[in-house]
Image (cartoon, helix red, strand yellow):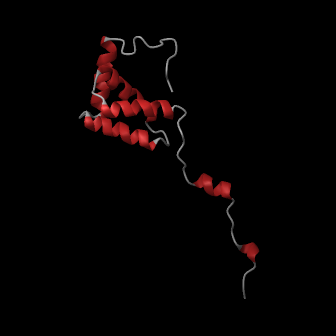
Amino acid sequence: MREPDFYAVQVHPMVADSATPKDQQHPLWSTDRQIVNQLLVGEPSDYNLAELARLRIRYRGFPGARDIQTDLDTVLRQWQLTEDALFAKTRLIHQAAQVYRGRSNQREDWS
């Protein structure tokens, strides 16, 4: 004897989607993508080191922007740095000079 269809469990599509984590799009992805592209072909100048550290912090633990996270790892490897060494260098850089001079100091970027 065949069971009636009302015994079949159906999962609402919204419930099924919430059970699997989805990558999010970071609101600053497009501008950050341009910076990362420059870092991939650039040298480890003070400014580039500061940018790399800033973006590593921004995307740490972010559920998405995997391409940026992967490329930031690539830049670290290209420059033969660990994240700890990068942060140590950038702390010294920021103590010695204002890395972002000539840029708008009126808006701080904490995102």
In the picture shown, does residue 61 fall above or below 102?
Answer: below
Q: Residue furthest bottom?
A: 1
Q: Position of residue 15 (x, y in %)?
A: 66, 55
Q: Quadrant of residue 36?
A: top left
Residue at (48, 30) in percent of width and height: 31
- Depth check: give the residue in front, 88 or 27: 27
Determine whether, in the image, residue 28 is placed left or right of residue 44.
right
Q: Position of residue 103 (x, y in %)?
A: 44, 14
Q: Position of residue 80 (x, y in %)?
A: 23, 35
- Depth check: give the residue in front, 11 or 97: 97
Determine whether, in the image, residue 86 is placed left or right of residue 16.
left
Q: Quadrant of residue 67?
A: top left
Q: Position of residue 70 (x, y in %)?
A: 38, 42
Residue at (52, 15) in percent of width and height: 107
Residue at (25, 33) in percent of width and height: 79
In the picture shown, does residue 91 fall above or below 69?
Answer: above
In the picture shown, does residue 67 fall above or below 87?
Answer: below
Residue at (55, 33) in percent of width and height: 27
Q: Examine the rendering and report whether any part of residue 57 can be seen.
A: no
Q: Examine the rendering and report whether any part of residue 36 can be seen.
A: yes
- Depth check: give the residue in front, 102 or 62: 102
Q: Quadrant of the N terminus?
A: bottom right
